[in-house]
Amino acid sequence: MESELLLRALSNCLHMPLLVLNERFVLCKYYNALETDFSYDYQTLFTDLEKKGQKYALITGKLNELLLLYAFSDHYFIFGPFRCNLTDRNVLYKYLDALNTPLAQYELTYTQLAALPIYCLDDIRDIIYLINYLFTGETTDQLVNPKFQQLTQTTSLLNKKRRILLTQASFSYAQIYQHEKKILMCIKKNEPRQLSEFIQTISWSELGHTLGPDLLRTQKDYLIVLLEKVTHLAIKSQLSPAKSKRLQNIFIAEVELCTTTAQLIETCTTALLLFTQEIAERQEKIRSPLIDQIIEYIKNNLNAPLQIDELCARFDLSQARLKYLFKTELQMTIRQYIILQKITVAKQLLCTGSDIQKLPQTLGFSDYAHFAKTFKRLTGMTPKQFSQNYQV
């Protein structure tokens, strides 16, 4: 059949699946096959079509995919499935949940649906016009019926609503900026635990919808931009540009291989923690010998009050000079460094089962209330809560 050869050529040019069934509804030819299985009952579809006295129909499947049916002579032709809109993972998952679909099928269904060719409605109208011409030789636009016009209006309305929702997203660009600022600050201050906990609090689904309709793709793009900013921070912190860029490229490649939001979060956490470690190690290596001596003294005398005047006298420095050295080389004040070291040792002792009541005296605090207040300010929990959660 000449028209069938032309239809095959059209299918190949459009990369659109084309099924040919004989009069007994048995599949006899299949062009541009896709690895999808949406379980259509073609016999019922065409039987309903013939009952209505029609030779063609544009129908919508249960997952909002489209099929173009055409009955000609003693054969039945099915173009599709294909799509006319983007596939939103969250919306699809909610729909599958309403259908009581097994959880294991969610990702497979999304992958199959996302693999379908996508055409705008104007393209679909042209395709219908061309298919009708190949079958009948007629050039009239007779396949464009009121149902197709209704589909066009409905899709336009849905697209308009989607754009409105995106502009009214609850997760604002200001929040995204604040998230980035906090992430970079945690890396700069070498706070891996706070960084890891903060990443887990980010609403990744809202983040994706704020940046665009394709959830996973926009999440990937966001992480790639974030990795670029972290790389600049690493280079600014004296980490080798070559090493910084190499780490960036490695993690961008891993981001592109992710197929779920959970994998993206895991990759993001790993990348940011590794950059934090590399930057911290580099900053330790570039400290001056004098700072190293002061730090060593502090660590060996954490049980003492450690007054700044005492340190100045011991190392023959003015207060201004001592404060400048710590602020420049450690990006914190000397008082902040001393408190941080005391709390770090306190956490280590709590993890080994040390008596909580004896820690203030061991670490040079004036009393337990002062120790507990400082500990909670830096860790987010009381010494007792920390001991219960982390004791080994």
Image (tube, helix red, strand yellow):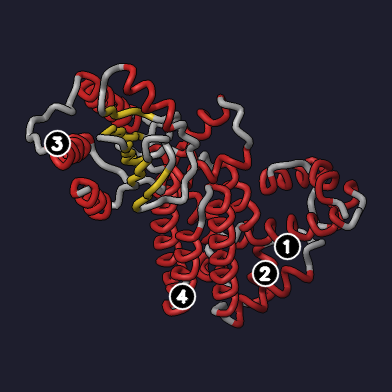
Q: Is residue 354 left or right of residue 293?
A: right
Q: Earlier in the sequence, mark 4 or mark 3?
A: 3
Give the amino acid type for the residue marked by disc 4 in the picture: Arg
Residue at x-position 18% and y-position 39%: 135
Asked if residue 120 is positioned above or below residue 199 in the image, the reply reads above
Asked if residue 4 is positioned above or below residue 245 in the image, the reply reads above
Residue at x-position 79% and y-position 55%: 347
Residue holding disc 4: 246
Give the amino acid type for the residue marked by disc 2 in the picture: Leu
Q: Find residue 15 and report its horizontal and vertical position in percent.
A: 29, 52
Whether pointer 2 and pointer 1 mark residues with C-beta atoms closer than 8 Å, the reply is: yes
Residue holding disc 1: 306
Label 3 sits on a secondary structure element that is helix
Q: Mark number for residue 311?
A: 2
Q: Earlier in the sequence, mark 4 or mark 1?
A: 4
Q: Does the image show residue 298? A: yes
Query: Label 4 vs label 1: CA separation?
Result: 42 Å
Asked if residue 19 is positioned above or below residue 275 in the image, the reply reads above
Query: Label 3 vs label 1: CA separation?
Result: 95 Å
Q: Does the image show residue 175? A: no
Number of numbered discs:
4
Of residue 334 and residue 183, the one placed in the foreground of this image is 183
Q: Find residue 367 and report its horizontal and vertical position in percent.
A: 82, 45
Q: Earlier in the sequence, mark 2 or mark 4?
A: 4
Residue holding disc 3: 136
Residue at x-position 33% and y-position 46%: 18
Residue projecting furthest to the left = 139
